[in-house]
Image: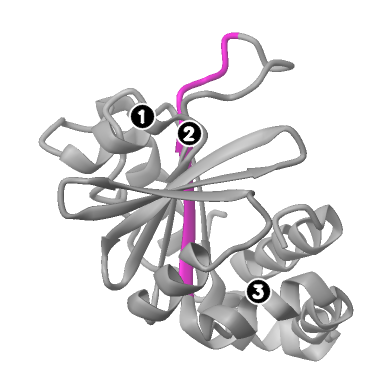
Amino acid sequence: MLRNRSTWLAALGVSAVALLSAPARAADLDPLTPADAQMVMSFNLRQVVDSPLAKKKGYAQKLKDLVDQNQEAKNVLKAVGLDPFKDIDSITVVMPIPQNPGGKAEKALITVRGNFDQDKIEAALMADKTGKVKSSKEGTRTLFEMKGDGDTVYATFADKKTIVAAPAKEYLLNSLKGGAKPNPALAKSVANASARRACGWA
């Protein structure tokens, strides 16, 4: 599923449409945002699917069709009992500004919030027979190391409604510790952007 770039590009496109058509709401940095984060991208998938413009143009249905055409994605979603168009509320990606834009991003945190069956998802991942998924314990958490296309992603549940992932294990674990204050400049930028949208300026 993660390897189907066309699906994720379509998701980003539909998200952009939803941002233009959805009602403005106050925006705050996600509580899990690392202190070194300087960039943030956040998509409310519920607004994407439910936005009038996305429905009128059929973008939401096109995205669903892309997923349906990917048998691997369908198998994964069925195994973990997840309907992304009903169960995922939001996806947020935060990271520092890359020093080497063309290199591999080691510092990035993906936070997915929604309605998940944690036991079913973890059981499905631990039952993987491809050798692409490894599990380990970090305290009380089950941490998953997932490989594909030469890249590795580490993921775990922050709580029953939150999945977090990162390309580096230590970055993921440090982000989960919390307690660090977010980048003030980033927090101000997000607040200003929210204010502009609320006033109809963006």
Q: Secondary structure at mark 2?
A: loop
Amino acid type of the residue tagged 3 in the rendering: Val
Residue 118: name its quadrant. bottom left
Give the crowd class for mark 1: few <14, some 14-19, many >=20 residues within 10 Å: some
What stretch of residues is rendered in magenta? 89-99
> At x 46% / y 29%, what residue is drawn?
168
Q: Which mark is residue 171?
A: 1
Instruction: Give the image location of residue 23, x and y in percent.
Output: 49, 76
Residue bearing mark 2: 108
Q: Mark 2 to mark 3: distance in Å?
A: 24 Å
Give the crowd class for mark 3: few <14, some 14-19, many >=20 residues within 10 Å: some
Examine the residues drawn in magenta and state their main secondary structure: strand
Whether pointer 1 and pointer 2 mark residues with C-beta atoms closer than 8 Å, the reply is yes
Question: Can residue 193 be seen in this snapshot?
Answer: yes
Residue bearing mark 3: 76
> At x 40% / y 32%, what residue is drawn?
169
Instruction: Give the image location of residue 149, x and y in percent.
Output: 77, 39
**Residue in the foreground of this view, choosing between 84 and 189:** 84
Front: mark 1 or 2:
1
- Quadrant of the drawing holding the C terminus: bottom right
Q: Which mark is residue 152?
A: none
Total numbered labels: 3
151 lies left or right of 30? right
Q: Earlier in the sequence, mark 1 or mark 2?
A: 2
Front: mark 2 or 3:
3
Q: Earlier in the sequence, mark 1 or mark 3?
A: 3
Amino acid type of the residue tagged 1 in the rendering: Tyr
Amino acid type of the residue tagged 2 in the rendering: Ala
Q: Mark 1 to mark 3: distance in Å?
A: 26 Å
Instruction: Give the image location of residue 15, x and y in percent.
Output: 66, 65
Give the crowd class for mark 2: few <14, some 14-19, many >=20 residues within 10 Å: many
